[in-house]
Every structure is written in structure tokens, then in C-alpha cells.
Image (cartoon, rainbow, N blue to C red):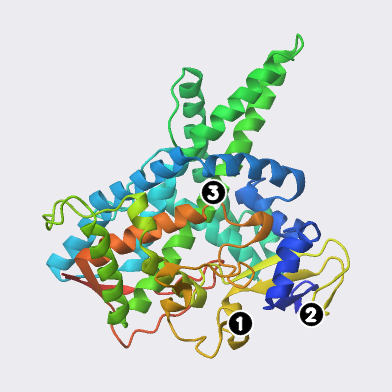
Amino acid sequence: MIQRPGGVRGIITANPSNVEHILRANFQNYPKGERFSFLLHDFLGRGILNTDGELWKMQRKAASYEFNTKSLRNFVVEAVQWEIKNRLMAVLKNACERGEVIELQDVLMRFAFDNICKVAFGVDPGCLHPSLPRSQFAEAFNDATGISAGRFFSSVPFLWRIKKMLDIGSEKRLREAISVVDEFVMDIIRSRRSEISEGHLREDLLSRFMAAAISDLDQLETECDKNGSQKMAMVSEKSELFVRDMMVSFMMAGRDTTSTALTWFFWLISSRPHIQEAIRREILLVKGNRNSITVEPEDQWVVFDFDELKGMQYLHAALCESMRLWPPVPVDTKVAATDDVLPDGTVVPRGWFVSYSIYSMGRMESIWGGDFMDFRPERWLKDGEFVGENPYKFTVFQAGPRICLGKEMAFIQMKSIVASVIHRFSLEVDSEYVPKYAMSITLRMKTGLPVNVKSR
């Protein structure tokens, strides 16, 4: 049993049977809970990451439909390919030619932010421009995320509420950051609403959700009475705010996770040249199946389509093995709605939090065997083909009804980046550099990952 500041009690488990019970078998009894929603409400509102019950189900249903469309998948692939060819490779090439050390975690976070903005909103903030410019929106989003998460880690519960009431310190910065985010997002929503009303539909998530929302509003309009115009204005405003909450949730979910996973991955393989060579052999095999296998000039960086990425089984295994040891989100927490008993006999009183440690589960001999601390992609392969693990044993993407909708999107981005980068460059890390964990919802490196870029 653990007691957090403020008298909040709960347990932490690393038992796959308990995790399956929490995430699937007794899913309805383990929502995120009011405390979680309360702490993040200022930033996330009623978005899919911050809700339970019917509101969550409705958003999940709408999002599931869009995330499973081939058109969105193709849009994601094209967005990732463009960012690699026009931004990422240029940044690495410049660092290579100048002999400069670059901070890879920052580069990957910039990539992820550009990409999620394109996929979510159809806009390009240009964070990964070769000059690595500052972005007011990106900085505001980062501040809002970090300060909101900091509410969970405060040693003095509700100190943040006093700061918020007085509009001082971190809460003042949070208010200012959210204001910047809201202005940016709401301007796009209103502009997109006008475009859709005129029959112009883009491929990004916002356009897809807005099209559905406008359809619902049109239906409501036909049912309004003589005061309908006023009612419609209220409904429209609420609809726009609701879409805002959904989109901010998707951005938060997709921004830090892939960049964090890739940072640890590149750190891991930097000291394992045999892993790098195995990945390069697979890349050459995939390229060999193209019509031409001639070496491309440097201004024509190699990118890969969806089918080619799907064929990179060893790379997929290596990424999973990296996330097993260094999961982007190390722990997740639910709250017991009613008294319960976990499969291992642990009694969970109503109102207690129940956390499961993804980080610990990836490092247990009882789950992974005697070589549990070895970085061995082969454990995920059988006859050269990737074989997935029990999702309640490997819970990086959650499991059950709340399993990550963006899982395929995440692998598209991660595999695309690794394949294109490792094909042209070697990223070298000082052998004496030891990363430290940042206090955050995601397992970021506290001081980033400095690398030397060498051409191949």
C-alpha cells in the first residue's frame, strides 16, 4: 500500500494478471477517476485522454473510425516522408558537415510536433526547420503539458490551487500557455469550419472531426424553434470547444511518446553496432525489392512507403525491445470505482488508486526470463517474422478498451525515421554519457541526448 500526499491511498502492481483484470476483465471498475480529470481539466478539458464513461465512449467511437481509414494512414505516411526528406535529413546533414554535436531528443521532439500538427490540424509550425527556430505555439504547448503534469508530482497537494487563485508562479504561466494554445487551435477550428461549409475538406483529423460535427449541427438546426439562432450559437460554441479538447488530447498523446521512444532507441543502438548492421541489412533487402537499387544522390533522401515499413520485421522487433526496457510512459494509474480484489489476492478498497508499472514489468525475470536485461530483438521474432507479446505483459500501448488508437501511426513514424537515418548516418554517443530520467509523465532524458553525426 502507498499513501501519497493529501491522504491519497493506493497500490502499485507489476503482475500481468492484475493488469489484465484492471484494463479488460473489470474495465468498468477502473476509470481514470475524478482526481486525474480535475488536475488536467484546465488544459485537456473533456478530451478523450481526460474523460470516462459515455463521453469517452463517444469520442473513442468517432476516433476509432477515422484512425482505421486507409486515407488517414496514407496521409500520415506522406506527412512523415515529407518531414524526413525536407527537414530531418537537412538538420543531420548540416551537423555532419560542420562537425557539430546536436541534441537528438530536441530534434526528435521538433519532428514529432511538426508531424502531429500536420496530422491533427493540417498546419506546419516548422519547428524542425534547419535553423531550429523558436515556436510560440510549441513552447506554450510544452509549458502547458509540463506544468499540468507537475500538479501530480507536487509534494504539497493543492498548492497549485492557491497559485491559480492568486495567478502567480507556475499557474500564471500555465494560464498564459493555455491562452496561446487556445488562440492557435480555436482560430484553426473556426477557419476550418468555414472551409468545410464551403465544401472544402482536407485530410487531417480536425477536418474529419469537424465535418462530422457540422453534420450533427445541421441536423440540430432543422429541429430548432423560433429561438433557434440563439440555441445554434450556443451549440456551435460548445461543439468547437469539444473539438478543441479532442484535438489537444490527440496532440498530447502523440507528441512526446514517439520522440521519447526514439531517443532511448538511438542511445541503445549507439553502443550495439551489431544491431545497427542487422537493421541496415534489412533496409538493403527492402530496397533491393525496388525497381532500381542504385544509390540515390544526397539531395534525394531515401524514404519508405507503408508496405516497405511493414516488411521491416527486425526493426519492428528492435523498437519493441527498446520500449520494453525504456517505455515512453513508465506507469499508468486508474481508480477503483467499487471495492475489488485483484487476481493475486490484493484487496482494493473503493476510491484507491491502482497503478501498474510498465517500466518494472519490462525488467522482470518472472515475465521475460533470465535474459530480461539483455537488449535482444530476437525475442520478438520467430522464423524471421515479428510475433507480438501478450498486451498485458507488454503494456506500452495500453490494452483492452483503451488500447492506443495511434499505435500504427507511432510505428509508421518511428520506423520511417530509424530506417532513413540509419541508412545514411551513424549517430555516435559518448560512451561515458549516462542519461538521467526527467520528472515527467513520459520517460524523457533530463539533459537530452547529445550525438555526433557521421556520414555513411
Residue at screen point 68% across, 14% down: 229
Tell me where residue 326 appears, x and y as whole percent: 49, 75
- Say which amino acid is labelled 2: Asp
Tell me where residue 258 appears, x and y as whole percent: 45, 61
The local crowd at label 1, few if under 14, some if 14 to 19, many if 20 or more residues have their Cα within 10 Å, is some
Residue topped by disc 3: 250
Residue topped by disc 2: 344
Tell me where residue 228 appears, x and y as whole percent: 72, 14
| Residue 323 falls left or right of residue 160 | left
First reached walking from the N terminus: tag 1 or tag 2 = 2
How far apart in space, not on screen, are marks 3 and 2 (Cα)? Answer: 34 Å
Disc 3 on helix, strand or loop? helix
Residues 314 and 327: in front is: 314
| Residue 101 falls left or right of residue 121 | left
Residue at screen point 39% across, 57% down: 310
How far apart in space, not on screen, are marks 1 and 3 (Cα)? Answer: 31 Å
| Location of residue 122 with respect to 265 vertically, above or below | above
Q: Residue furthest front?
A: 383
The local crowd at label 3, few if under 14, some if 14 to 19, many if 20 or more residues have their Cα within 10 Å, is many
Disc 2 on helix, strand or loop? loop
Tell me where residue 134 appears, x and y as whole percent: 34, 53
Q: Label for residue 367?
A: 1
* Residue 11 seen in render: yes
